[in-house]
Image (cartoon, rainbow, N blue to C red):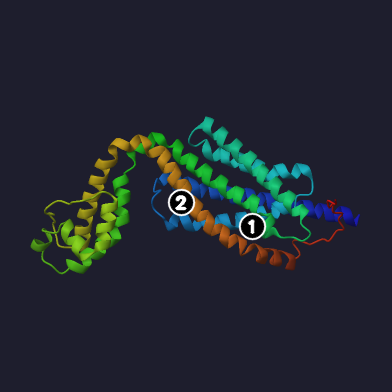
Amino acid sequence: MESVGLNKYSVVKKSILYVLFAIELFFLCRVITNFVENQRYFSLSPEFAIPFALILLPTLWTIGLISHSINKKWEIFIAPSIVFILSFIFLTKFKTEEAIVGSVFSFLYFLFSIQRTNSISKSLIKIRIRYSGRSATKGFLLIISVITALSVFLMSENISSINVGEWAADIVEKPVKEAVEKEYEKQVAEEITSLNLESLKESNPQVAAVLNSFGITELPANISLPESTTESVTGTIKNSISTQINNVVEPYKNLFSPTLALLVFGILQIYNSVIYFIYTNTIFLILVLLKKFGLIHVKTIPVEKEILEL
């Protein structure tokens, strides 16, 4: 009877763990949806990065626990099935056929990752979740990057409306504003109307380097401004940069879709690397806390090991 009670208690805890994983994945999909729909892929926005990290990190903790607590063969399909369902719901917002392909890939790859982690964990004498859980956690991170990049690619119908020049202008706004504040903030309106790229190059080489990286070699000879404020000068320069960059990239907009998808994949891989580093240095503390509160137990069992002799 005591054994039956313990088994029921274990089933309840596992059910809660899978429900928690589904909730975490749901909110992760919402954060990614906002990121994709806002189309600010070049911006390392804290509005995306912070919620993304705060949700993804505990999700990795949950995956680590799930992948190491599988006792029956059929249990290995539960977490990948959750990934399949939520990734399909997420991708159907863009295109149905590709959603099927993406969700099937997510299911199969995560199933392989979970199975590999479970196999490694059972072959170890002691629990080393930081090592044995690598396949499941890294597999999940790769799936997140692929699914997000795929969703960006599926938005190709809206690519032509993306204002690349505005993105680039936002990136150079800070150094441009610093240069303007340093050299022109206290000057009169007549002097500011003669502001041009050469004067900015002399006052701030950083601005020149950033502008040159976007192919901007010159600005209007004179800038007509209603008032001599830093904001108006910076805004005028940003508008000029935005216009010139949009003119340069117009012939290449057909390549935007795959290029943006690759860029997003790369950006998320950087995010994921940082989050994975935090995970590997915190998962042990999570296990200690769970053991202290009696939520998990470490059981020692005798095992037989095969060795090869000649």
Give the SS element for disc 2. helix
Q: Residue at x 33, y 37 (%)?
A: 253
Marks 1 and 2 in Cβ contact (< 8 Å): no
Of mark 1 and mark 2, the one earlier in the sequence is 1
The percent coordinates of residue 171 (x first, y second) are 32, 55
* For discs 1 and 2, the disc positioned in front in the rendered view: 2
Distance of mark 1 from mark 2, alpha carbons?
22 Å
Above/below status of 11 relative to 87: below
Indicate the amino acid at tag 1. Trp
Question: Residue 166 location in percent, x, y?
Answer: 30, 48
Spot the residue most to the top. Answer: 97
Q: Which mark is residue 225?
A: none
Q: Residue furthest front?
A: 310
Residue position for label 1: 61
| Towards the viewer: 82 or 115 | 115
The answer, for residue 124, to whether it is visible in the render is yes
Horizontal and vertical percent position of residue 201: 20, 60
- Can the viewer see residue 52 in this picture? no
**Residue at the spot 57% in from the left edge and 41% down from the top edge:** 87
Image-based side of 28 in relation to 183, left or right: right
**Which one is in front, 297 or 283?**
283
Residue drawn at x 22%, y 67% is: 181
- Answer few, some or many: residues within 10 Å of disc 1's Cα (few below 14, many 20 plus, some between 14 and 19): many
Left or right: 267 with respect to 288? left
Few, some or many residues within 10 Å of mark 2 (<14, 14–19, 20+): some
Q: Which mark is residue 267?
A: 2
Determine the secondary structure under disc 1: helix
- Give the residue at x 12% y 52%: 221
* Amino acid under disc 2: Ile
Q: Dividing the image into 4 quarters, which one contains the N terminus?
A: bottom right
Quadrant hosting residue 46: bottom left
| Left or right side of 94 for 281 | right
